[in-house]
Amino acid sequence: MEKMKIVGRRSGKIGTSSKESAMWLNTIRQLRGNKGICPRGVYKFKTFEEANEWMYKMIARSSLGLLH
C-alpha cells in the first residue's frame, strides 16, 4: 500500500452525514428515474466553455425525458 501525503488541514464541518447524502441521492433518483445524463461515447471539445454548454444541454434534455 502506498504512503499518502496529507498537505494542510480542513477546518469546520466536512461534508454532510451519510444519511443526508443517501436521502439526497434517493430524491434525485426518483426525479430522474433510471436515465443517464448523456448518450455514451467519447466527446471532444475545443474549449471548456463549449464542453460546459453541451453538458447543460444534455442535462436539460435528460430532465425532459428526451434522451432515449
Image (cartoon, rainbow, N blue to C red):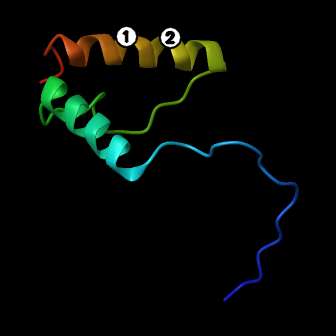
Where is mark 1, residue-wise?
57
CA–CA distance in space, label 1 to label 2: 6 Å
Residue at x 29%, y 45% (from the top left corner): 22
The answer to whether residue 4 is left or right of residue 16 is right
The answer to whether residue 10 is left or right of residue 31 is right
Helix, strand or loop at label 1? It is helix
Quarter where residue 13 is shown = top right
Contact (Cβ within 8 Å) of mark 1 with mark 2: yes
Q: How many marks on residues?
A: 2
Q: Amino acid at mark 2?
A: Glu
Helix, strand or loop at label 2? It is helix
User: Which numbered dot is residue 53?
Assistant: 2
Residue that protrudes farthest toward the front in the picture: 12
Closer-to-camera residue (45/68): 68
User: Which numbered dot is residue 23?
Assistant: none
Residue at x 21%, y 30% (from the top left corner): 27
Closer-to-camera residue (48/17): 17
| Image spot of residue 47 (x, y percent) | 66, 18
Quarter where residue 68 is shown = top left
| Image spot of residue 64 (x, y percent) | 17, 10
| Image spot of residue 39 (x, y percent) | 27, 31
| Image spot of residue 7 (x, y percent) | 87, 59
Q: Amino acid at mark 1?
A: Lys
Mark 2: few/some/many CA within 10 Å (<14, 14-19, 20+): few
